[in-house]
Image (cartoon, rainbow, N blue to C red):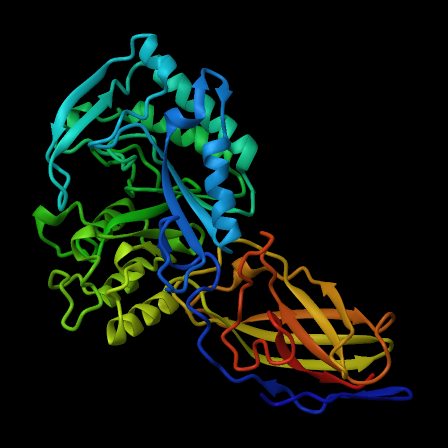
Amino acid sequence: MVALILVLSAGWARTVGAGTLAYAPAPPDNPLKGFVSYPREGGGFPRSLEWDYTRLAEVMVGPAEFNWAPFERKLEAARTRGCQFYARFYLEWPGRPTGVPRFLLDAGLTLRTWTNTNTQPFPPAIDHTPDYEDPRLRAALTNFIRAFGARYDGDPRLAFVGLGLLGTWGEWHNHPNDAWFASKMVQRVVMDAFEAAFRRTKLVARYPAGPHDPRYAANDTRAIGYHDDSFAWATVDTGRAQDDWFFEARLRRAGALEKWRAQPVGGEVRPEVWDCVFDEPSCVPPGQEFDRCLEATRVSWLCCQGVFRPRLQGAARERAILAAQRMGYELHVREAEFLVAEGQVSLTLSVTNTGLAPFYYDWPVELGFLDAAGTGLIIRRTDWRLTMILPGEPSAVWRANVPMSGLPAGEQRVLLRVPNPMPGGRPLRFANQDQDRDLDTWLTLGAIHP
């Protein structure tokens, strides 16, 4: 880094050059990106996100009665590990008890019991599909979503919410019994409820759909991102008619290839390749290479149990760490310029996104002024917005004027940080060599001599 030393003399100010700040890769456990573990995993692999499924019946005990304790325990357990949580609720799961609330079953809601063979690489299992068209189920779902959002929208422990609820595993399909899946009317009711209930926490849906989709209600213009459940297996558009269900093909048909600019995209590496996706050579199907899928989707996070298993060692582990770093955003402060004059410090920063996707929340951005002894820190909040820094676009220019009043005399090192709103959460670290140089979690920008 080129340090900035600014000198103030009576009646004038001088800027001693603009500083170019050196790049260094940001860590693989930056918040809200990278590989996502289940709560009981970890294995020493760097992560900032956990996810889990929750049966609706665990929390919904009456038409408008809820026991949030099972879900709250998951949020709190993740928080104690410094991780934010990605949530999905479900009604049906092959081989497990139904997730339909007891009060609906007692009222006579129909369940279709069948053997689900769409469970690869796991064996077929008994599934219980509810009648999604029953108005009592529809009312229960909207009541749940409304209560869920009222309690948790904007909770800093909750990173993203998958729409879930409908279909096997909450994945919005009942293949091969597609006729049993929810109608477009029911899908719209669920999406309307989620959009109304969650105005701050970001939502993701399994399938991109435009207005002419034959099976799914349109979501292309909704404030909802996407989740590719077959990443590195059925992601990249092949152009073949039999592969029209692949994720990029669906994005293209929905006219949603650019939706990542405002709404997040995540997913799950297909279970068949969990343990070998980062081998050399990789086991993924030809044309579905991991990096190619990253470029096609711009995912910010991926669930993949394989990276959290002890067998991932050596070169394969290093490739997985590089993959985690490539996902989502990477913010690099390229230049910093300060001017001290007339009782204030004027700062201009040039910030670029060297990643694949935006940072999707406007977390606070703070400036710090640290004395030469490294013991006194003054913090000033800015109005700078992280969500406006898009990859592939010119650097964002951040400007601020900070009054000198309140700053101690003598040299001050100027610092920058983005604190995580969740207590104990991992802070956002910039892709700069001087990240954490003078103070943990802070990027050193330079120095001033007021």
Query: Looking at the rendering, in which quadrant would you find the N terminus?
Result: bottom right
Image point (70%, 75%), residue name: 347
Is 12 or 154 nearer to us in this picture? 154
- Quarter of the image for residue 291 reads bottom left
Up-down relation of residue 306 to residue 108 (above or below): below
Where is residue 211 shown, x and y percent of the image? 29, 36
Up-down relation of residue 447 to residue 59 (above or below): below
Where is residue 191 shown, x and y percent of the image? 39, 32
Residue furthest to the right in view is: 10
Up-down relation of residue 32 to residue 371 (above or below): above
- Quarter of the image for residue 329 reads bottom left
Image point (22%, 23%), residue name: 129
Image point (86%, 70%), residue name: 406
Image point (53%, 69%), residue name: 429
Left or right: residue 408 versus residue 111 is right
Where is residue 311 shown, x and y percent of the image? 24, 65
- Quarter of the image for residue 319 reads bottom left
Whether residue 407 can be seen here:
yes
**How many dots with numbers?**
0
Is 124 or 134 nearer to us in this picture? 124
Left or right: residue 340 versus residue 316 is right
Left or right: residue 392 versus residue 150 is left
Whether residue 162 can be seen here:
no
Query: Looking at the rendering, in which quadrant would you find the C terminus?
Result: bottom right
Where is residue 88 shown, x and y percent of the image? 37, 38
